[in-house]
Image: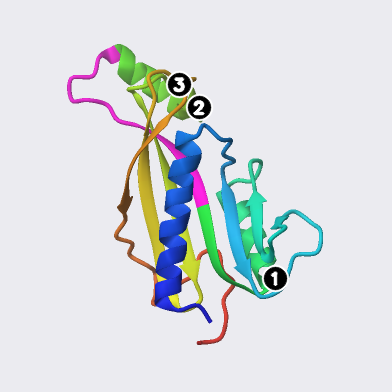
């Protein structure tokens, strides 16, 4: 069973690793998950860790939010996962109060075409959102703003900010499968 101190170290370690990956220019897959499990994965969609077969990495670039959640719940059930980290990259737009009609039209066109990611900064904003779940602890979510000079430039990651989540019910889990009370 994971203690609160171990969960907090897991969260901080993953946030530090993500920052190092951005600063080092290493490849990032989104969405991506890391599962800490009681059983090792035997083939399939995850990539095991040679030094620890109970840690699985899952890249889900072709799955939407609902499919990735179902995929991770099934995998977590199969592997008897007790903690999970899921990271997503989000695109959104912010119009200044004095936005030009051209900027407003470009945003509306991108929204209709579901192509916000193709807008140029500063109209297009980006962030990394990371969710952490463990059997015994409430879900935590953290955001880090991404900044780029152009849409193709390498991003820099701003400071992490913990989000205040309002869960639908106590002990709600998004990615871990429902279990009997622990």
Which of discs 3 and 2 lies nearer the camera? The answer is 3
Using the image as rendered, state which of residue 168 and residue 121 is in the foreground: 121
Tag on residue 79?
A: 1
Q: Position of residue 155 (x, y in %)?
A: 43, 29
Tag on residue 151?
A: 3
The residue drawn where x is 80% and y is 64% is: 42
Mark 3 residue crowding within 10 angstroms, few (<14) / some (14–19) / many (20+): some
Mark 2 residue crowding within 10 angstroms, few (<14) / some (14–19) / many (20+): few
What SS does tag 3 mark?
Answer: loop
**In which quadrant of the rendered view does residue 13 lie?**
bottom left
What SS does tag 1 mark?
Answer: helix
Using the image as rendered, state which of residue 105 and residue 81 is in the foreground: 81
Q: CA distance from mark 1 to mark 2?
A: 36 Å
Q: Is residue 124 magenta?
A: no
Q: Is residue 4 left or right of residue 68?
A: left
- Residue 171 visible somewhere in the drawing: no
């Amino acid at each position: 069973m994971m203690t609160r101190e171990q969960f907090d170290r897991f969260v901080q370690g993953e946030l530090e690793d993500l920052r190092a990956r951005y600063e080092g220019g290493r490849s990032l897959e989104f969405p991506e998950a890391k599962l800490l499990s009681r059983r090792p994965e035997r083939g399939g969609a995850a990539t095991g860790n040679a030094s620890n077969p109970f840690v699985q990495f899952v890249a889900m670039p072709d799955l939407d939010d609902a499919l990735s959640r179902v995929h991770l719940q099934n995998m977590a059930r199969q592997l008897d996962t007790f903690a999970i980290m899921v990271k997503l990259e989000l695109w959104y737009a912010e119009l200044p109060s004095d936005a030009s009609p051209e900027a407003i039209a470009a945003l509306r066109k991108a929204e209709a075409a579901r192509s916000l990611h193709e807008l140029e900064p500063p109209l297009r904003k980006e962030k990394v959102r990371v969710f952490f779940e463990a059997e015994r602890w409430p879900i935590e979510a953290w955001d880090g703003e991404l900044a780029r000079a152009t849409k193709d430039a390498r991003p820099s990651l701003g400071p992490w900010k913990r989000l205040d989540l309002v869960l639908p019910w106590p002990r709600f889990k998004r990615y871990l499968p429902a279990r009997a009370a622990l």
